[in-house]
Image (tube, rainbow, N blue to C red):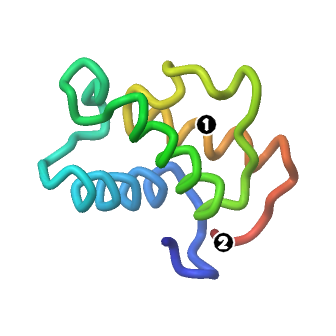
């Protein structure tokens, strides 16, 4: 989980997600790697990612945002987090 007062930027979200994924999958992951096509992430693990993103970044992911395309790459997840934080009025660190 991110430090309570860390600034949330695309770079910090990408770095945190790379660490999270590498710890969970025990393999190296790149920010533009298709996590589903390469088998790094299953649909079951994707639900764990949803919970992690919601808890780590104080966002709610529902409805149309639960599409696989938003979880296909680390960069896509970072963009989702930043978009949701802005839309949901989340400010400050994670």
Residue 93, picture quadrant: bottom right
The residue under label 1 is: 80
**Left or right of residue 5: residue 71:** left
- Residue 59 position, x and y percent, is 73, 52
Q: Earlier in the sequence, mark 1 or mark 2?
A: 1
Residue 92, picture quadrant: bottom right
Label 2: state its secondary structure.
loop
**Left or right of residue 74: residue 89:** right
Please tell me how crowded label 2 is: few (under 14), some (14-19), or many (20+) other residues with Cα within 10 Å: some
User: Which residue is at a point 78% across and 46% down the rendered structure image?
Assistant: 86
**Residue 37 image label:** none
Please tell me how crowded label 1 is: few (under 14), some (14-19), or many (20+) other residues with Cα within 10 Å: some
Viewer-side residue, 93 vs 69: 69
- In this rendering, the answer to whether 59 lies above or below 84 is below
- Residue 10 position, x and y percent, is 50, 49
Q: Furthest residue to the right?
A: 89
**Residue 93 image label:** 2
Spatial separation of the CA atoms under disc 1 and disc 2? 16 Å
């Amino acid at each position: 989980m991110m430090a309570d007062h860390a600034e949330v930027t695309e770079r910090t979200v990408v770095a945190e997600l790379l660490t999270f994924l590498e710890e969970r999958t025990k393999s190296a992951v790149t920010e533009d790697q298709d996590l589903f096509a390469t088998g790094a992430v299953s649909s079951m693990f994707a639900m764990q990612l949803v919970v992690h993103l919601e808890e780590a970044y104080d966002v709610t992911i529902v409805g149309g945002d639960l599409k696989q395309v938003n979880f296909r790459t680390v960069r896509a997840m970072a963009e989702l987090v930043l978009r949701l934080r802005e839309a949901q009025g989340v400010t400050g660190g994670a």
